[in-house]
Each structure stands twice: as C-alpha cells, then as structure tokens.
Image: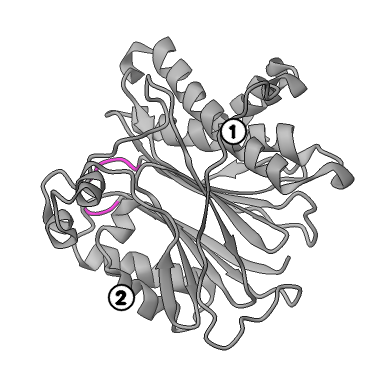
Amino acid sequence: MLIDYAAITHVGRVRKNNEDAYLVSALDGDEPLVNGLAPMPSTCRAGILAAVADGMGGAAAGEIASREGLASVAVNLFSHWGRIPAEEATEPGLVQALRHSVEEASSAVLRYAASYRASRGMGSTLTAAVIWKGHAYLAQVGDSRAYVFRGGALVQATRDQTLVNDMVAQGTLTPEEARVHPQRNMITQALGAPIPIRAVLGRVPLRRGDRVLLCTDGLHGEVPDAVIAQLLGEHLPSGEALSALAEEALRRGGRDNLTGLLLSLDDPGLPAPAPGEGIRIERLAIPKPAGDPDVSSTQPLTPIIDRLGRIIRGKA
C-alpha cells in the first residue's frame, strides 16, 4: 500500500521530559522502532501497525510505560498475526490478535512496574491502527485519539475513555461543560492498570485519499477539531502537516507532551470515495468466547521477551 507517513513528538512548553511515544511497523517481520521511522516495504501482506501512547507515572516511569506498551503490542501482533500464512489470515483472527496484543501490553507494563519500585503506578494510553485490506482496525485505551479525514471532513474515530465522557453519556455533564471540566484528563482505562482492561475495537473502511491521524492529548487537547481539519485540508505532505499541527499546539500553550502520527493513504488499490460518501466508524464488540484458545501459546514466551527488550533499548 502506498502510504505517505510521518510522525512528530515534542516535550511541549511546560513538561521537563517527554513521556509520549509512537511506532510504525510493517507486521511481516520488520523490527519495530519506537520513536523512529524506518522505510516501509512496498508490500506488506500482514498490514501496517501505527500507534501512539501517552505515558504517566512521574520521573522516567511514564516514558518507560509508553515505550513498553508500544513495543509489546508490535511484538505480540507479529507473533500471533504476522506469522500466520496468508491463506489462513482472516478478519476475526486479526481482531482477536489485536485484542490479545493490547491485553498483553497492559500486562507487560504492569509486570515492569511490579519489578521496579520507582515505576510502581506507571501506566500509558494506547491508540493503535492496523491498516489491512482496505480497512483501519482500531484499538483504544485511554484518551489518545484516532481521526479520519476525507474530503474536508474530520471524524474522531475513537472515543476518549475519560471520567467526563462517562458523565456526558450519563447526562450529568454537557459536552460544553466537559471541555472545561477540571477532571477532563482523568482517564478510566490505561495500560498497566491492576484490573483487566477492555480495549475498544473499531473498524473504518478506507478510501483513496484518506488521512489517518493518531495523536495524544497534548495535540488534540490544544488544537480544536476545526483547526485540525483546516490544516489537514491544505494537502501538505504528511511531515509538513504534522509540523503545522505541532506549531499550532505550541502556540496555544503546549501544556503537555504532544505526539502526532499521520498516514496519507494514496494507494490506487483503494476505492475512490463515492460522491458525498461519509466516514463510517464500525464498533467491533467481540468478546472472547468460551473455549477460545489462548493465542499466547502459539509461540514460546522467551523469544518475545528477548525481542521486546531489544526494541525498548533501541537495538534491532
């Protein structure tokens, strides 16, 4: 798939260290690189993983949590999806592998925190997209976001898992009140939480010319959706568009770390959007059925842990 992609991360104007992270990885076996971009192969049978994470926990713990979570997702997806023969690859198999990989990422962060006293209580958001066979398969934990931009329209493809969003859904807050609520950044799920997480899964049918933006709240919390849409609609290359978004976030205060990852999907193999065709967000509620085999048993754990360590340390 022809994808023009770029990423940007910035510490912001207030924080002393950057606890955000991003990752783009071909799932056919390339070693993923956290906070770095490698050339994408011309073909990728198993799809492409793109993800951002916003760590928390103080000192360097948040930085570790975000990197640990992203690396774990990438390694587990390769192990339980990327290695499947093409003739056996199915959408339900991808969704199961994605759900399992997010759960394993949360466990990996929790295990790290349990092993190092200074890291206890650390956690991370996660917003991930697997681009495969003309769709974006999304997984959401926390309040980082995925957007899809098409024909001048910007749609938020994920729903923030926050206290104020829950209050809006219950009718105790209005959307306007939620935007300025003092607890608007309090998330209800995070990688590394001591309770089982429930990642929200979704699917977006893609069209030629779509742009998929993944970003942490340091970007979407500063830049209104209307301004994001305006900048993406200027048809700048992905890197220039992200630079413009980051500059806007910094101009508006830059109160948090900010990270953006932009995929511009110009592949002629994708169908062109029909006139007036909107962006369809399909929620995937796929509980693990009784008797569902544990996909973690498809490969010994030691190679996964070894590979995870190389990625975290930046040694391919």
- Mark 1 in CB contact with mark 2 (< 8 angstroms): no
Question: Disc 1 residue type?
Answer: Ser
Q: What type is the residue that disc 2 sits on?
A: Ala
Residue underneath mark 1: 101
**Which residue is at 88% across, 46% downward?**
87
Q: Secondary structure at mark 1?
A: helix
**Disc 2 element:** helix
- Distance Cα–Cα, label 1 vs label 2: 33 Å
Location of residue 63 by image quarter: top left
Residue 30 is labelled as: none
Magenta range is: 12-18
Q: Residue tagged by mark 2? A: 226
Residue 155: x %, y % from top left: 42, 68
| Colouring scheme applied when the structure was drawn | one colour
**In the rendered image, which quarter contains the N terminus?**
bottom right
In the rendered view, would you say 5 is above or below 119?
Answer: below
Please state, as top left, top right, bottom left or bottom right, where the C terminus lies in the image.
top right
- The verdict on residue 250 being magenta is no
Residue at the image point whose x is 51% and y is 23% from the top:
108
Left or right placement of residue 151 versus residue 96 in this view: left
Give above or below for 150 relative to 110. Answer: below
Residue 15, image x, y percentages: 23, 44
**Label 2 crowd (10 A; few <14 / some 14-19 / many >=20):** few
Percent across and percent down for residue 71 are 57, 35
Label 1 neighbourhood size at 10 Å, few (<14), some (14-19), many (20+)? many
